[in-house]
Image (tube, rainbow, N blue to C red):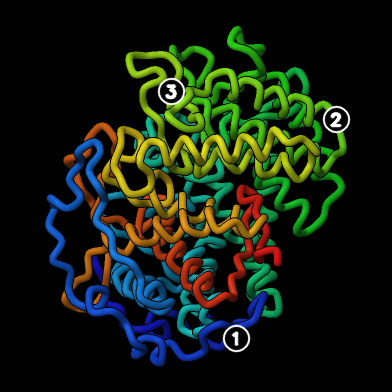
Amino acid sequence: MKRPNTGAKQLASEKFSSNKAPLRHNVLVKNIEEVKGSTMCEACSIESNQTPQDMAYTPGKPFPTHHAQNASDYLNAALSAERWIATFEHRTPEGIFWQQNASQPIDLSLYSGSAGVAYFYLKLTEVTGNAEFAEKARCGLSYAAAHWRDLLLPEQAAFQDNREGVPGVHLGAHMGVGGVGLVLIEGAKTFAESRDAEKYRRAAQAIGRFYTDESAQQGENGPYWTGSPALLMDGGIMLFLIALYETFGDQQLLEFIKAAGAQYLRWGAESPRGGVDFNGAGIETPFDWPNFAFGSAGSGYLLAHLFRITGDARYLEVARRCADFLDAVAVPQKRGKLIPHKLGGDDEFTVFYLGYCHGIAGTLRFPTLMGTLDNDIRWATMVNQLADGAEALGAPEHMSAGLWNTVCYCCGHAGMAHTFLGLYCIDGSPRWREFATRCGDILLGSMKTHADGSASWPFAWERVHPEELSQRIGFYDGAAGIASTLLELFMLERDDYHWPRMIDDPFPEDPRR
């Protein structure tokens, strides 16, 4: 059942309402009402006239766009999204969860559920310093800390696995237990001076023990979980464990990570195309997803982190070989190159995703991280070639087979803008900033503003069903992630950009001056 946005004090139990919200950096906006009342262009403030046809898919069709007139346009859009997300709040004695469909199990995941929405409220807190948002973040984190094991219940596990069509994702980082742990780590950092920080730390460490002591299986060289190297699966679990180790410190955990890393190396196979391939789709499948969420781009990214924390050169060498494989399968475009969504099957080499999961918004993170560890021009070249390839397809303004009528963080413009803002933080290139801003134009242009001032985004979640539009609240698949990217653009326009990052996000927190 939808609940009205009645404010955090009514939604939170008394034990959550007395905490203050220490921030990790300077508060940017102290008075939300003042910002809400600031000058905003008329097209952003009136109810949208958008029709379903505006987001109907046609290859080459331009996305609806609207250019922000000032920084507050981005913030107002994010606040309008928060107002819509808040209608799905549910209060319990243990905190808040968010749920759109009461007929489904409560989704706790980072990807599409309550942990991701709580992460959005963390970002709202960091950017605005608003006490109500801080309280909602704490309540969401508290619920996640109390209920993370619910993701292991048969009904919830089946819900996550069946939705993605991949058994075992409920154990992983994005759609499973590890993602909740990553958000709890971020909560412990953001509220480091609060009494809640200890609760989040204990819960994150309990998730770590679940992986090390309860769910790990023993392979020939070390522990593993699902048997898939994908970042959505075992690769993501290992990223969570690395983040846990680096945040709270535990030499025994580091030794466990080293053993799991030795097992992980066994899953790389020499490819007849060249290089080393980690096929997260599974060795028995007739196809291979080579990009970030399931393929060698994500595996190379994990291996780079393993090299970074262990100094073991084997990881760096295999990461380089992952890049060799990606180079071997990359397809030249009119300008630059792109790595196909899939190898094998009827659409091999024909569909090029541009988002986080199977496209450049995710895959660019691999050469970015490698560039900080390996002094080789190939990494900057790879970044530029993939960016060139995306623009050659008409991105970000035009739809294509791999950038269909979607704008979310996982598959669309929110994820692309985030990545290009990260690249801008590295070298200050106007090209990266402009690309991110162009994505922001589409996020504003595709926003549906409701009569009550709330806002959502109608888009097609499934590439193979572009006619089916939905409006979702999640971080990777809906309004929470889109609004978070709008917060980044707000800070960029104010020239005070600062974005604390999770472990799958290798960019600097601040632009390098």
**SS at circle 1:** loop
Residue under label 1, please give it. 20
Quarter location, residue 367 = top right
Q: Work out which quarter of the rendered image holds the C terminus and state it.
A: bottom right
The relative height of residue 167 versus residue 431 in the rendered view (above or below) is above
Query: What is the x, y in percent for residue 108?
Result: 45, 54
Q: Work out which quarter of the rendered image holds the N terminus and state it.
A: bottom left
- Can residue 98 be seen in the rendering of this structure? yes
- Residue type (three-letter) at the residue carrying disc 1: Lys
Query: What is the x, y in percent for residue 427?
Result: 66, 56
Badge number at residue 342:
3
Query: What is the x, y in percent for residue 314?
Result: 82, 26
Residue at 44 percent of width and 80 percent of height: 12
C-alpha span from label 3 to label 2: 30 Å
The 10 Å Cα crowd at callout 1, few under 14, some 14 to 19, many 20 or more, is some
Residue at 87 percent of width and 38 percent of height: 311
- Residue type (three-letter) at the residue carrying disc 2: Ala
Taking depth in this image into account, of 152 and 475 the one nearest to the observer is 475
Residue at 51 percent of width and 81 percent of height: 128
The 10 Å Cα crowd at callout 3, few under 14, some 14 to 19, many 20 or more, is many
Mark 1 vs mark 3: give the one in front. Answer: 3
Taking depth in this image into account, of 96 and 146 the one nearest to the observer is 96
The numbered mark, 1 or 3, whose residue comes first in the sequence reads 1
Taking depth in this image into account, of 438 and 86 the one nearest to the observer is 438
Query: What is the x, y in percent for residue 84?
Result: 29, 70
**SS at circle 2:** helix
C-alpha span from label 1 to label 2: 45 Å
Quarter location, residue 347 = top left
Q: How many marks?
A: 3
Taking depth in this image into account, of 220 and 333 the one nearest to the observer is 333
